[in-house]
């Protein structure tokens, strides 16, 4: 304990010691007096009290809420039987008035105190637990206030003895062995700090603050109710389970509410839950503070309100909310108020859910509670006050004059209030277990187990510190309820999930709809086994979110300046998807996949290539086949008229070779259509390069022949012997072999290969042939272009030769077309995307091939077929008029 706390406690001890001595000599007049004592006179075993007995303590016990003066060991009890403490403004000129409780009696707290008496009497009648030893008790009213709790703590600690004697036969300590209570966290914290100085154990049935689990500050504290640490975690998981991410939070401004809400907010943050507001209030605050909290709830957008509050504070808030219509809210409550029947009169809480202490059954308790004789009631100021309030009658002349006298017809069995209602025993069982825990601790301290029986020494010098040590080790079951404490003095956390549906009569009722067990594996703690009724009687789960869920295909973008639960849903960028609801980010599809239109699934990208099944492929293939057939038909025509002058005059051997190469040129374009393969990629470029060189070589040979033929007509010229048929064949073969060599090197070093083009288009895959070596590809094209230019130059030189015989100008036109086509091919090839690159290359092949066949062979076929009169040697040997 800190030095400051010790000093405060010592000062309080001195003050209250003086105050308490005066208490025994005064009567506050309300029937509930805080002066107390007990007689603890015992002789040796088997000897009855007589004149020689030593009275160790002699006190007035008539003004306690409940007492027993014949116990070998005494257990203290502190309950909030009244709801308020009488407040007096001191002027510091006269003796302050005595502290006293006021207000109506809390009948449920009264039942707790009576349950403690029942448990002690049950233990005293037991032959197994503390045999031969009787337990006494002192039960006090703290009226849920700090000053009264301090006062009562000192009373239980010092015993308020008027006379003290010393004798070896007396009980070694005038203090109680342990205390059961109190009924709240803040009073329990205060009491634990005081009685902890004297090593007196405290077993609370209703103090749930997680701070009390700190054994360094509260080494003497135990409880039979779970810590709020577990309840806060359970509430956060409950809120998350129903999809509520935007909630309001209210709490009691006390240790219970503040610590409990702090734990809940921490757990809620981990679950991704946002809190729109968090307000605190207390029944001792001004009404304006309660009204402000109520207004915050009314103006909020959160549909769900989590209330970590005590019963008394919550009642004030609900009363304020009931005065003015409020939008419907789904209430989620802590055990501090959700199980109280008095609050179910507020219909605005219809459909509320929360955690309560599990229900239990204590055999014989109901009969004990209802077994109140008139003499017993009259002898107890507390029971007298309870009886008069319950039946609105007076038991004596000293009571209020506006009440009728009780005539004996009052029957407590017909009374309907929390005192008589034993159908929902919750905290009552915690008191019951707490008393038994203390009894077992005393048993373990003073009793020895033998083979034949249990021997207990009631005269042993047992101190409260021994009971504290044994209380840490208790582990037993009573009425089927297990009792043990962990290292923090806490029990196993188990809760009932309760719901407030509206009954057929229109009133709210408490229904258990599930359970929560913190000892189960993660994810299995909840067990909801009944249908929940929500606010306004709805059957579907209400929605409480700041922003609607983002569907798959979108991702969350936080709104500036707002909590993480407030966001906008933005579609995923191109090429990315999100397949979860409320995804915080999108992720890209694999390289060969692409999102669907909703961008929530990746599908394989469609594969694209120039196929024979599409229109463009069919058209190009048709032109390619037509060109090949045209070449074959012309070759047939030429072969049929091979003896005619026009065929013989135009070097029929080169003509047939040219037609053959053109046929191959047309057909090689078919290799560019269809799905690329390793062989088709190598074949299409090499076949194209070789056949076109063969074609150009033939044209070049024909051009040279034309030039040589006219040079040979000059006097003394024998040039034709240097360019005869053999030389012509060698020229064609040589030019072609050079291209074959280039293609061979290309294929050996870095051949073309099929590839998937993933860069040209993002949403589809282009199957194409990679060039392998770019240098090899452009070397093939460059060589073709070089031959074409050379051929074009020679054809230009021979263009003015006699028209009737000269085909040089037709070659010139064909080379002009050829060069134009391939010059425009280069930029078109580079800029065409995907399968259109292949289409451009095919188009260039077909265009240049058709240019050659039409320019060179079409005029001759026209003469052969339609102008046979021009197909004569005389006509072919004729000269142009300007040569005359």
Image (tube, grey):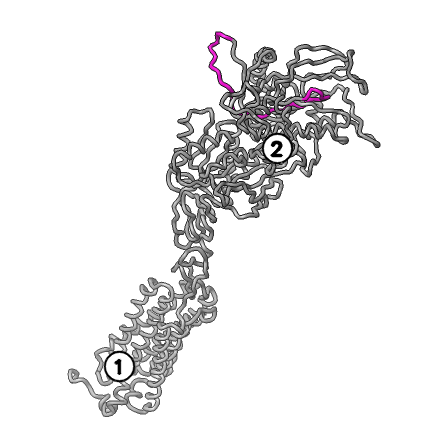
Q: Of the residues tagged 2 and 1, which is closer to the observer? A: 2
Front position in the image: 794 or 644: 644
Is 86 covered by the magenta stretch?
A: yes
Callout 1 crowding tier (Cα within 10 Å): few <14, some 14–19, many ≥20: many
- Find residue 803 and report its horizontal and vertical position in percent: 21, 83
Query: Residue placed farthest to the top in the image?
Result: 93
- Could you say which is closer to the camera, residue 543 or residue 90? 90
Which image quadrant is residue 121 in? top right
Q: How many marks?
A: 2
Give the left or right position of residue 303, taking residue 645 as reference.
Answer: right
Q: Are marks 2 and 1 in contact (CB under 8 Å)?
A: no
Q: Which part of the image, by quadrant, shows the C terminus? A: bottom left
Residue drawn 46% across and 69% down? 677
In the rendered image, which residue does mark 1 sit on?
A: 807
Answer yes or no: is residue 125 visible.
Answer: yes
Tag on residue 430? none
Q: Relative to 213, does residue 822 appear above or below in the rendering?
A: below
The magenta-colored residue range is 68-94
Q: Position of residue 51 (x, y in %)?
A: 77, 11
Q: Where on the picture, by quarter, is residue 200?
A: top right
For the N terminus, the quadrant is top right
Q: Residues within 10 Å of mark 2 (few under 14, many from 20)?
A: many
Helix, strand or loop at label 2? It is helix
Tell me the number on the disc at residue 428. 2
Could you tell me which secondary element the residue under label 1 belongs to?
loop
Q: Residue at 42% across / 71% down in the picture?
A: 674
Q: Say if 747 sits above or below 84 in the image.
A: below
Q: Residue at x 19, y 86 (%)?
A: 879
């Amino acid at each position: 304990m800190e030095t400051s706390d010790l000093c405060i406690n010592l000062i309080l001890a001195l003050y209250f010691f003086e105050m308490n001595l005066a208490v025994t000599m005064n009567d506050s007049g309300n029937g509930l007096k805080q002066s107390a004592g007990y007689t603890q006179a015992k002789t040796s075993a088997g000897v009855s009290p007589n004149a020689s007995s030593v009275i160790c303590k002699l006190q007035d016990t008539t003004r306690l809420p409940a007492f027993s003066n014949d116990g070998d060991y005494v257990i203290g009890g502190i309950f909030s039987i009244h709801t308020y403490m009488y407040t007096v403004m001191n002027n510091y000129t006269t003796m302050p008035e005595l502290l006293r409780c006021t207000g109506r009696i809390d009948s449920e707290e009264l039942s707790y105190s009576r349950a403690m008496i029942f448990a002690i009497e049950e233990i005293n009648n037991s032959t197994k637990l503390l045999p031969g030893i009787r337990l006494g008790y002192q039960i006090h009213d703290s009226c849920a206030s700090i000053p009264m709790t301090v006062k009562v703590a000192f009373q239980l600690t010092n015993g308020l003895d008027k006379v003290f004697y010393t004798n070896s036969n007396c009980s070694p300590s005038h203090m109680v062995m342990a205390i059961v209570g109190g009924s709240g966290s803040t009073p329990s914290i205060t009491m634990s700090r005081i009685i902890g100085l004297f090593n007196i154990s405290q077993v609370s049935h209703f103090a749930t603050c997680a701070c009390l689990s700190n054994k360094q500050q509260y080494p003497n504290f135990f409880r039979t109710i779970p810590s709020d640490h577990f309840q806060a975690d359970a509430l956060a998981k409950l809120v998350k389970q129903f999809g509520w991410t935007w909630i309001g939070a209210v709490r009691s401004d006390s240790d219970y509410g503040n610590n409990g809400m702090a734990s809940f907010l921490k757990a809620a943050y981990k679950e991704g839950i946002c809190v729109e507001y968090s307000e605190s209030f207390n029944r001792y605050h001004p009404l304006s503070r309660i009204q402000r909290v109520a207004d915050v709830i009314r103006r909020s957008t959160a549909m769900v309100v989590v209330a970590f509050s005590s019963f008394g504070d919550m009642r004030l808030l609900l009363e304020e909310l009931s005065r003015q219509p409020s939008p419907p809210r789904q209430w989620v409550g802590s055990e501090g108020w959700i199980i109280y029947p008095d609050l179910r009169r507020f219909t605005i809480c219809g459909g509320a859910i929360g955690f309560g202490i599990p229900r239990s059954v204590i055999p014989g308790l109901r009969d004990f509670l209802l077994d109140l004789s008139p003499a017993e009631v009259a002898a107890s100021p507390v029971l007298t006050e309870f009886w008069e309030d319950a039946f609105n009658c007076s038991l004596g002349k000293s009571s209020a004059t506006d009440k009728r006298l009780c005539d004996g017809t009052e029957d407590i069995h017909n009374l309907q209030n929390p005192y008589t209602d034993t159908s929902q025993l919750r905290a009552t069982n915690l008191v019951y277990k707490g008393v038994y825990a203390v009894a077992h601790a005393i048993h373990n301290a003073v009793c020895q187990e033998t083979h034949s029986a249990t021997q207990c020494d009631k005269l042993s010098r047992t101190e409260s510190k021994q009971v504290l040590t044994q209380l840490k080790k208790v582990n037993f079951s009573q009425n089927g309820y297990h009792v043990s404490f962990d290292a923090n003095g806490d029990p196993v956390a188990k809760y009932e999930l309760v719901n407030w549906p509206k009954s057929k009569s229109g009133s709210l009722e408490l229904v258990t709809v599930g359970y929560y067990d913190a000892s189960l594996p993660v994810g299995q703690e909840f067990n909801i086994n009944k249908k929940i009724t929500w606010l306004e009687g709805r059957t579907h789960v209400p929605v409480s979110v700041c922003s609607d869920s983002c569907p798959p295909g979108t991702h969350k973008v936080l709104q500036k300046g707002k909590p993480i639960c407030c966001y906008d849903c933005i579609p995923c960028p191109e090429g990315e998807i999100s397949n979860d609801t409320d995804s915080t980010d999108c992720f890209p599809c694999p390289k060969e996949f692409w999102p669907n239109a909703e961008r929530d699934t990746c599908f394989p990208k469609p594969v694209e290539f120039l196929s024979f099944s599409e229109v463009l492929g069919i058209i190009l293939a048709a032109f390619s086949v037509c060109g090949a057939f045209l070449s074959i038909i012309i070759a047939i025509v030429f072969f049929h008229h091979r003896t005619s002058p026009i065929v013989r005059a135009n070097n029929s051997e080169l003509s047939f070779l040219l037609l053959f190469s053109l046929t191959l040129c047309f057909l090689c374009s078919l290799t560019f259509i269809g799905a690329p393969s390793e062989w088709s990629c190598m074949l299409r470029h090499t076949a194209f390069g070789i056949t076109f060189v063969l074609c150009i070589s033939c044209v070049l040979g024909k051009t040279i022949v034309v030039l040589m033929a006219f040079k040979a007509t000059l006097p003394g010229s024998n040039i034709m012997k240097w360019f005869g048929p053999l030389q012509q064949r060698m020229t064609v073969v040589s030019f072609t072999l050079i291209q074959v060599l280039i293609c061979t090197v290309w294929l050996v070093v870095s051949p073309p290969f099929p590839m998937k083009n993933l860069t040209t288009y993002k949403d589809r895959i282009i199957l194409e042939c990679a060039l392998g070596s770019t240098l090899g590809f452009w070397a093939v094209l460059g060589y073709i272009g070089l031959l074409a230019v050379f051929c074009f130059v020679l054809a230009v030189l021979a263009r003015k030769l006699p028209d009737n015989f000269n085909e040089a100008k037709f070659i010139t036109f064909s080379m002009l077309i050829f060069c134009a086509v391939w010059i425009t091919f280069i930029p078109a090839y580079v800029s065409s995307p995907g399968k259109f690159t292949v289409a451009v290359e095919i188009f260039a092949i077909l265009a240049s091939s058709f240019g050659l066949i039409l320019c060179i062979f079409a005029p001759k076929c026209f003469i052969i077929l339609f102008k046979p009169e021009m197909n004569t040697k005389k006509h072919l040997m004729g000269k142009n008029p300007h040569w005359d």
